[in-house]
Image: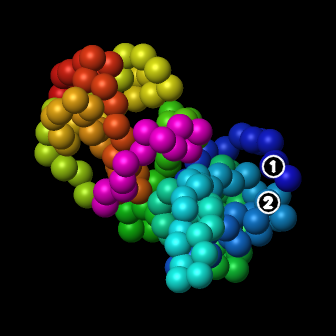
Amino acid sequence: MTIPDQGGLWYAVYVCSRHEKKVHRLFQDIGVTSFLPLLETLRQWKDRKKKVQEPLFRGYVFVRIDIGREHMKVLDTEGVVKFVGIGRTPSVIRQKDIEWLRTLVREPDYISGRVASMPSGRKVRVLAGPFRDLEGTVVKQGREDRMVVFFDSIMQGVEISIFPELLVPVDS
């Protein structure tokens, strides 16, 4: 069951290790709008292979709340550690970033890796396709460029593959 957006701003919540799905489900149960970007991956064990849904960013769940009224409701949820932010101030996640994350999980074939720090390189914007208007940093030159889309608010990035002709430099 997905709860429709009721207003408020988006925030990232840091959760206990491997509790992302459980916390997301608990948020839905208590009426908190949440978003957990998941990617389907093939996992192999000794005796079998299985497709599983894994979080795009381990340890994070996104919530859309009125921080003044609902922050304790979120913090009191089992598995929640804290809001992601600077000091005691939670960082607001832009609606645009949430939409990009939704696009990324809808287009999993483009994702080639996850990065935890900002690489150096050329800042570009995508001209067309599913990632149109997405801005990021190019980390590799070649037939297909690899671009890192970095989310400052949670200090996490995702590496995607994209054709160079779809990119235009952005002034810093």
Category of crowding for the residue at label 2, using alpha-carbon neighbours closer than 10 angstroms: few (below 14), some (14–19), many (at least 20): some
Q: Amino acid at mark 1?
A: Thr
Q: Write the residue at 81% across / 49% down.
A: 2
| Residue 12 visible, this angle | no
Task: Give whichever of 99, 127 is nearer the camera.
Answer: 127
Q: Which residues are magenta?
A: 105-116
The residue positioned farthest toward the front in the image shown: 47
Q: Which of the numbered marks, if any, corresponds to residue 2?
A: 1
Verify CB contact (< 8 Å) between mark 2 and mark 1. Answer: yes
| Residue 161 visible, this angle | yes
Mark 2 and mark 1: span between their CA atoms? 7 Å
Q: Write the residue at 54% across / 59% down.
A: 41
Q: Quadrant of residue 48?
A: bottom right
Q: Amino acid at mark 2?
A: Gln
Left of 157 or right of it: where is 138? left
Task: Give whichever of 41, 66 is nearer the camera.
Answer: 41
Q: What is the x, y in percent for residue 15?
A: 56, 73
Category of crowding for the residue at label 1, using alpha-carbon neighbours closer than 10 angstroms: few (below 14), some (14–19), many (at least 20): few
Q: Which of the numbered marks, if any, corresponds to residue 28?
A: 2
Q: Which of the numbered marks, if any, corresponds to residue 62?
A: none
Q: Write the residue at 35% across / 23% down.
A: 126
Q: What is the x, y in percent for residue 3?
A: 81, 48
